């Protein structure tokens, strides 16, 4: 965020009171302990030695070492400071952990972190937050970057420059009418070996009254440092999921391809439903008699890029991979059973988690990706990938949850090659800058605006993650600053059909126009036979708009959300 801080001899910082800085350590299975820390001087606490450098060019660099003679397990380490009087109507723009977690403004002292609701099972918390535990009373948190505000006026931005080594969570509370901020490196129980030192992601802090400016400057800096992949061409495409769901057949794909001749799709992407079992990605079920090669061949014969969905870090209990290599599965935190990566009714319940710290597993992921590329795919949607950060015991206990996710993606990139478009989905955002070409930045759309009260995916306290177009709209607006700074944003699919949907024509158009105004990927998810001339015309307009907005975003100006600091949610994107 800018380069405007100079380090003076008293280490003055406009928003970080370094004279009263504290460091907080949470060893695994124990309580947090805290001690004052002086920049430039090593501090000892809980067997660790922590060094916080004086701020330099707006960044606070820090590191942690295990100073003792035995290995330690660490949940979290935080820099904690007093950020001054809370003032009127204090708010936090809270970015969510993964693709589907909401990103929106919350009111400090009023809104409650979803993890404090006792109803969802702990697995749900682990899927949607970096730290699967329960937030402290009164605490709100934001992942990777946060904006503090009073009313609709921003006050300061705080961000972690990078996220591949550990997640960075900004926790905020009001204590005695003052703001307490804890910039937290999440280790998730990783082992720090005796004598080992780890450099933590630097923390940047900047003041501005416009929240978009703060978020954009953070993303500029992070994208630069992490070498974000921001040069992929603009993409328009077709995706099977939001019309056919898990019942998709090879005939559906061929029928849509046959109708698509004069449609402007670069990519044709087959989603969930082709595989014989979760984990066995090279084998199809009997709805796909021509196998993965047959589908890719048909798509390529039509002149398009073939795309495929996989959930690479999961294995169904009945999959071949789980039977052949039980040692590739992470083990549950306690007991001898495998660790859960996801619970998903549609797939039959519990899905196990592959251990991405095991070199055989990363070799397997690379080989699978290479085989998919050989079969003809040049676009891979990697889904449910938060699962590699779920709790468990791993071959290499020194790896943090973020490192486990990144190791899995790196393996797939290694196997797929540099030219394949990799789309992250259900993905911890912070760990993947520089890895993915595209990123799903919101929860699933659905052929309805608001989620029905009895939607099976609905989780108490996590309703904003339930598939619903309204929920995707929120994140498409609030995460617009990420587009072409961290990757290409994928807002999720548009639906243009006017039958077999509960979206009104007005709702479908509002969503499609928002996707266009985001400049991100434009993916259509319909049976093309159901789209009438109005729908087709709308797509042409959306594409014209999306290409324009994307070109401007590439040049450095992404679209901005209206009402980014509104606790009721954003109103839309600039120009939409
Ligand atoms: C395929 C889909 C699509 C979609 C992804 C992802 O919690 N759940 O039950 C749950 C189910 C599906 C889902 C997200 C969560 O959607 O975002 O685009 O690929 O998987 O299964």
Image (cartoon, rainbow, N blue to C red):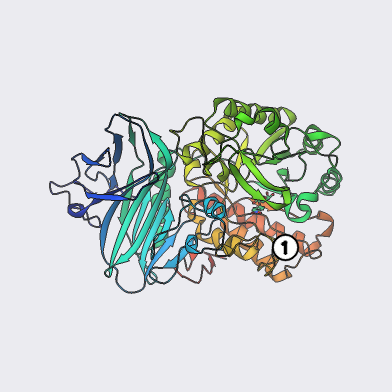
Is 438 displayed left or right of 56 in the figure? right
The x and y percentages for residue 243 are: 77, 55
| Residue at the limit of the structure toward the left, as seen here | 9
Viewer can see residue 36:
yes
Image quadrant in which you'd find residue 226: top left
The x and y percentages for residue 385 are: 58, 43
Q: Quadrant of the C terminus?
A: bottom right
Which residue is located at x 40 percent, y 70 percent?
152
Viewer can see residue 433:
no
In this view of the protein, which residue sits in the foreground, 149 or 68?
68
Q: Is residue 565 above or below residue 256?
A: below
Q: Is residue 127 above or below residue 501?
A: above
Q: How many marks?
A: 1
Circle 1 residues within 10 Å: few <14, some 14–19, many ≥20: many
Which residue is located at x 72 percent, y 62 percent?
447
The x and y percentages for residue 274 are: 78, 42
In this view of the protein, which residue sits in the foreground, 132 or 144?
132
Image quadrant in which you'd find residue 200: top left
In this view of the protein, which residue sits in the foreground, 136 or 547?
136
Which residue is located at x 27 percent, y 45 percent?
57
Q: Which residue is mark 1?
A: 447
Q: Secondary structure at mark 1?
A: loop
The x and y percentages for residue 224 are: 42, 41
Is 507 displayed left or right of 463 in the figure? right
């Amino acid at each position: 965020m800018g380069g405007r801080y100079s380090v003076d001899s008293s280490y003055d910082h406009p928003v970080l009171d370094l004279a009263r800085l504290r460091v907080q350590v949470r060893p695994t299975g124990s309580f947090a302990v805290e001690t004052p820390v002086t920049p430039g001087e090593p501090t000892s606490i809980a067997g660790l030695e922590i060094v916080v450098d004086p701020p330099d060019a707006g960044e606070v660099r820090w590191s942690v070492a295990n100073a003792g003679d035995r290995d330690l397990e660490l949940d979290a380490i935080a820099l904690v400071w007093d950020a001054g009087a809370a003032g009127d109507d204090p708010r936090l723009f809270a970015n969510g952990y993964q693709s589907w977690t909401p990103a929106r403004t919350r009111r400090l002292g009023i809104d409650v972190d979803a993890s404090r609701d006792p109803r969802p099972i702990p697995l749900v918390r682990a899927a949607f937050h970096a730290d699967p535990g329960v937030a402290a009373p009164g605490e709100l948190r934001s992942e990777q970057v946060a904006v503090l505000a009073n009313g609709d006026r921003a006050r300061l931005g705080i961000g972690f420059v990078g996220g591949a080594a550990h997640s960075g969570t900004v926790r905020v509370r009001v204590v005695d009418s003052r703001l307490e901020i804890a910039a937290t490196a999440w280790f998730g129980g990783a082992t720090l070996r005796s004598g080992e030192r780890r450099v933590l992601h630097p923390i940047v802090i900047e003041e501005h009254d416009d929240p978009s400016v703060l978020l954009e400057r953070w993303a500029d800096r992070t994208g630069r440092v992490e070498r974000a992949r921001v040069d992929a061409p603009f993409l328009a495409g077709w995706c099977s999921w939001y019309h056919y769901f898990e019942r998709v057949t090879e005939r559906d794909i061929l029928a849509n391809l046959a109708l698509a001749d004069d449609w402007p799709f670069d990519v044709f992407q087959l989603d969930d439903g082709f595989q014989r079992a979760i984990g066995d990605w090279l084998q199809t079920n009997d709805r796909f008699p021509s196998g993965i090669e047959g589908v890719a061949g048909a798509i390529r014969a039509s002149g398009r890029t073939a795309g495929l969905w996989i959930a690479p870090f999961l294995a169904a209990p009945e999959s071949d991979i789980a039977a052949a290599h039980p040692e590739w599965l992470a083990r549950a935190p306690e007991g001898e059973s495998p660790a859960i990566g996801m619970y998903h009714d549609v797939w039959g319940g519990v899905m196990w988690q592959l251990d991405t710290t095991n070199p055989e597993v990363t070799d397997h992921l690379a080989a699978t990706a290479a085989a998919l590329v050989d079969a003809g795919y040049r676009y891979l949607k990697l889904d449910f990938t938060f699962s590699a950060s779920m709790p468990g015991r791993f071959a290499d206990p020194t790896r943090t949850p973020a490192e486990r996710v990144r190791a899995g993606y790196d393996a797939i990139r290694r196997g797929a090659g540099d030219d394949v478009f990799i789309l992250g989905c259900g993905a911890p955002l912070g760990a993947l800058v520089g890895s993915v070409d595209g990123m799903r930045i919101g929860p699933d759309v659905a052929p309805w605006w608001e989620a029905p009260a009895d939607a099976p995916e609905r989780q108490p306290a996590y309703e904003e993650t339930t598939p619903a177009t309204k929920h995707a709209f929120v994140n498409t607006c609030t995460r617009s600053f990420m587009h072409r700074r961290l990757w290409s944003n994928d807002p999720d699919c548009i639906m243009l059909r006017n039958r077999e949907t509960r979206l009104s024509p007005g709702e479908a158009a509002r969503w499609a126009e928002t996707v266009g105004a985001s400049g991100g990927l434009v993916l259509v998810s319909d049976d093309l036979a159901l789209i009438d001339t109005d729908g087709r015309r709308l797509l042409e307009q959306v594409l014209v708009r999306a290409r324009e907005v994307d070109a401007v975003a590439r040049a450095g100006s992404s679209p901005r959300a209206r009402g980014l600091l509104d606790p009721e949610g954003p109103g839309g994107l600039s120009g939409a």
